Amino acid sequence: MIASLASRHSWFEATARARLAGLLDPGSFSEILPPAESTPSPHLARLDLPGAFDDGVVVCHGQLEKRPIFAIAQEGQFMGGAVGEIHGAKIVGLLRRAVQEKAAAVLFLIDSGGVRLHEANAGLIAISEIMRAVLDARAAGVPVIALVGGSCGAFGGMGIVAKLCSAIIISEEGRLALSGPEVIETVAGVEEFDSKDRALVWRVTGGKHRYLMGDCAMLVEDDIAAFRSGATELLTGWTEPAPSVANLRASQQALEYRLADYAAYRDGLQVWAALGVAEPDTVPLLDRDSMVALKEGLPT
Amino acid sequence: MSLNDILDKLFPAGHAVAVANQVITGEATTAQGAVAVLGTTDAAAIDHAMALALSAYILDTIERHPGRPLVFLVDTSGQALSRSQELLCLNGSLAHLAQCVDLARRQGHASLSLVTANAVSGGFLSFGLMADRAYALADAQVRVMDLRAMARVTKIAHERLVELAAGSPIFAPGAESYVRMGAIEAIWPVPSASLLEEALAAAGQAAPASDQRQSCAVERGGRQLAEGIAKAVQNAARGA
């Protein structure tokens, strides 16, 4: 146990490039449009802000357990992983390439607050293009798997993008939502959402909550190797379903039931109790394996 | 302009549209036949219930009226800002709505959206920007955030943003910026049945599932980089 903790390499703390290095088969990483062939955002330069040659996202080809795949990794440490014109276009281009080449999968390492406000319109439109491109990839039979566990989580338009992916793998540290708690607090008041209450923020947006609710397919440790084995496990035998009315009808019904049952709740503790968790107070303390056992034992 | 005025001008041949919880659903008659009319009104802050009402109506239309065009009327101030909404994964319901619009396209339903008053961030992403083509009325407000709020968040002086916005569709709020950026086809001076007929005809001819916004942006002098970057990524020789 102690040995495994010592060898753990935190996904949360790693850079986008370090995540890819540990996620893909050793030596298989092959960047497309690497920094040497790219230029920083001219829109940031106009605001006298420092840019990055990769504009905060790495797109690449690589292998996962010898399976050729594509990957996209957002760098949360640059502009909060936010989507600007170049950043967004790299993602759209990669997703389109995955369709052309009938890739086995796209791994989408999301770590982003959403639209980069300094390029607001370009960012919003780019996210709309990413949404369409993810759905195009899936419709072409290419699974797009979101991996969420970085310091910026998946928020704003990137929260929507994450939920358009075939499945989401999330860590306890991962967060997935639309509006950030700070935004809600600013607009609606601290009584509505106290963004400084970290435990509350995690009970509303965190990985355990999203996993228990079924919004994320898989919960993994905050460990690059755990994301790697999770992605491998998920993709083994995965068949991307064709878009269909029947599937969306089923989602529609599940979402309607959930809203009818839980609309009045304001805290994860309440929802977990309603889901059938006997001791919801203990959920924040449970380790990953106990969480999986808990989830699998819930009434369906 | 009231919703009824807009509907009367867009659909002089008749419309039967209900509004409940700021959600518009119904149908209308055009020269090209019946269309589904749906969307939001009064600057709706999109929540789960609204998103699911819209998605349910899209699924009903796909099942009951194959091929019927979808006309979205967009008036949204963004997404609902509340803890209970986030607790139930609001981004998930918005994604579900977007997927329903996308499925309609794949099943041969032409779609267009018309921003009647406001189109802001998440609310706009979930359906207005998912349509084949988007249009806006002349006085519509289209934006991610107003410049004052943007100044607060980015810590860049408001005056500076105003000055830069004057020359940059990249972040200047307004429908005109979105036309130049490739996301809005055209601005309509008034709601008009003839403009709607033209737009429906154009949407019907567009290749399904092909997103042309990057190339439009280059032609219109908006986003100069996106198309080239996306193509470079698509076509780059694979590295060693």
Image: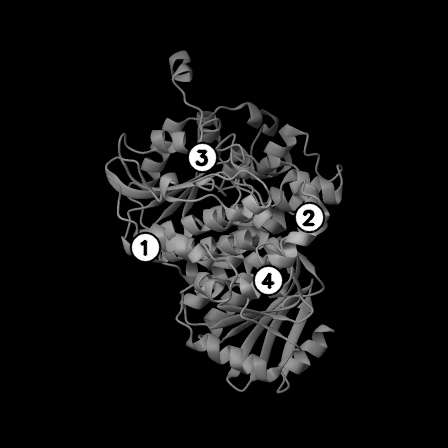
Residue A227, picture quadrant? top left
Depth-wise, is mark 3 or mark 2 nearer the camera?
2
Provide residue A86's location: percent of width, then percent of height. 46, 49
Depth-wise, is mark 1 or mark 2 nearer the camera?
2
Q: Amino acid at mark 1?
A: Val
The residue labelled by disc 1 is: A99
Q: Residue at x 62, y 65 (%)?
A: B175
Q: Amino acid at mark 4?
A: Ser
Is label 2 in a helix, a strand or a loop?
helix
Q: Residue at x 71, y 78 (%)?
A: B5
Q: Is residue B42 above or below residue A55?
A: below
Q: Is residue A166 above or below residue B70?
A: above
Q: Are marks 1 and 2 on the same chain?
A: no
- Label 1 or label 3, whichever comes before in sequence order: 1
- Label 4 or label 2, whichever comes before in sequence order: 2
Q: Is residue A226 above or below residue B123?
A: above
| Residue count near mark 4 (Cα–Cα under 10 Å), binned few <14, some 14–19, many ≥20 | many
Q: Amino acid at mark 2?
A: Arg
Depth-wise, is mark 1 or mark 3 nearer the camera?
1
Is residue B31 left or right of B79 when viewed as pictured?
left
| Label 4, label 1: how far apart the Cα atoms are | 31 Å
The residue labelled by disc 3 is: A296
Q: Chain of mark 4?
A: B
Provide residue A143's location: percent of width, then percent of height. 35, 49
Q: State the residue in front, A84 or B202.
A: A84
Q: Which mark is residue B160?
A: 2
Q: Amino acid at mark 3?
A: Glu
| Label 3, label 2: how far apart the Cα atoms are | 54 Å
